[in-house]
Image (tube, rainbow, N blue to C red):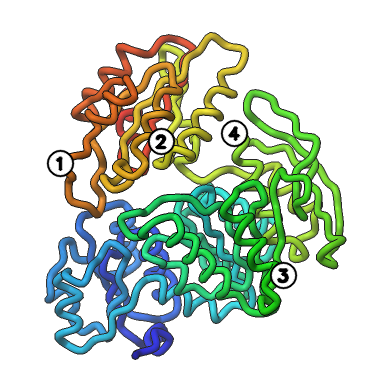
Amino acid sequence: MSDIREYIAAGRRVFISGIGGVSTSALADLFRLRGIEVSGSDRSDSEVVERLRSVGVRVCIGHAAENLADAECVVRSAAIHDSNVEIVEARRRGLPVFERADAWGAIMLEHRHAICVSGTHGKTTTTTFAAQTAMDAGLDPTITVGGAIPGIGTHRVGSSDLIIAEACEYCNSFLRFNPTTAVVMNIEEDHLDFFKDLDDIKRSFERFARLLPDDGRLCCCADEQGSRELAEKLSADAGYKPQVILFGEDGGADVRAENLSETRGRYSFDLIFDGARLSLPSARTRVELKLCGRHNVVDALGAAASLWGVVEPERIAQSLSVAKGPARRFEYKRTLSMGVDVYDDYAHHPHEMAACFSAARQALEGTDGRLIVVFQPHTYSRVRTLFDGFAEVLREPDAACLLPIYAAREQPDPEISSERLAAAAGIDCAETFEDAADWARNTLRPGDILVTVGAGEAYKVGDLL
């Protein structure tokens, strides 16, 4: 089997199928800066595609065999399957085909420190916090994350021996990574179009944790059952050598929050580094988060745990106190003329939505405003599997409207629909973005908060208002 490291060197020719994605476009930039001739394809034009073209990357719109030209290998995004004509053509020619996670795993081997942040929820914000903290400390890291970081974007190429990466479990992509520090935020049911069940997901996270070298670190959230159980299992394994660090609000965590206070959804807390068990430096310092929502406390603790001993505790606290969240994570968009604040959130799992709605409720404290939601479900398999959870959480807003399901990588399922989910939740449904915008105009009143929610294109409704 070919080694991708042979091909990601100056002078080589690499074709990226699905080059417009967050992770693959980051690879295109990194390859280009290494002197690699990069080309690629995507299904449609986008700002990302235009930016790549502006720096000399040849990008074809639409997938075709001839797009490969004289490429020596193909790197594909997770959305590109074996049946894609470019993959079929690459194999006909005998060209090696690599997953984009293979490339990131190889790049990690070139760094002394590779912090990989995983979990069903919270990994983008935690990666963002860690990246901003490392930047503030002058560590000049290479960064790849699933959301846009203010002032950075979705990625940057640094000159240091540190790389910070969001590590997604879908299709077991993170098993191709080479972490030296692995962060596990939580382990819950999701991506059941790939995983068989929760036990299958747990096995994958354990395999991810076992990728660590003996002198590596495993940072697990003590507040979440799945991640805590993983930490307990590996701590009890005499053959597992990496250091296991617990973080969270749990009083027994090594990195924890104490003396929490809250003002309009923004939390302050004492950040405790308890190094007694781990032979690491102990410290107590104060953090005042600027982001709304209690879930950000745990995300901040995960970032702090990942950099413990690398960045001074006081500097970590200072950075977390000014940190901005990634795009589409309860992101304030605008205030409408009628006095309604519009937010957008990427949440597409019931637990993520509950955290989003809780943040909005706290932002409304002391007012008569209501929480109004427009939600676009993401993938039929997720709606089918988590149907009851979605129905329950969608009863929490004062009013909610569903958009049609965003199919993404899937074919429509005739047994699952937004109409059926809306009926179960007792809420409204719209057929188009324009219809949802009309619903919002007729529903909203001064002082309300409108949140557009979902991993697809629900944000378009806010843009129409």
Residue at mark 4 to residue at mark 2: CA–CA distance? 20 Å
- Residue at figure coordinates x 30%, y 65% from the top left: 19
- Residue at figure coordinates x 40%, y 51% from the top left: 190
Closest to the observer, 60 or 275? 275
Specify the amino acid type for callout 3. Answer: Gln
Residue at mark 1 to residue at mark 2: CA–CA distance? 20 Å
Label pair 1/2, CB-CB below 8 angstroms: no
Residue at mark 4 to residue at mark 3: CA–CA distance? 30 Å
Specify the amino acid type for callout 1. Answer: Pro
- Residue that carries the numbered disc 4 in the rendered image: 293
User: In the figure, residue 375 lies in which quadrant?
Assistant: top left
Label 1: few (<14), some or many (≥20) within 10 Å?
few
* Mark closest to the chain's N terminus, 1 or 4: 4
Is residue 175 visible in this depiction of the protein?
Answer: yes
Residue 18, image x, y percentages: 27, 64
Residue 392 lies, with reference to residue 415, above or below; the image says above
Answer with left or right where residue 383 lies relative to residue 266: left
* Mark closest to the chain's N terminus, 1 or 3: 3
- Residue that carries the numbered disc 3 in the rendered image: 243
Q: Which mark is residue 79?
A: none
Label 3: few (<14), some or many (≥20) within 10 Å?
some
Label 2: few (<14), some or many (≥20) within 10 Å?
some
Specify the amino acid type for callout 4. Answer: Gly
Residue 231, image x, y percentages: 65, 61
Find numbered disc 3 in the image and state the secondary structure of the residue it sits on. Answer: strand
* Mark closest to the chain's N terminus, 4 or 3: 3
> Dividing the image into 4 quarters, which one contains the N terminus?
bottom left
- Residue that carries the numbered disc 1 in the rendered image: 414
- Residue that carries the numbered disc 2 in the rendered image: 389
Closest to the observer, 243 or 282? 243
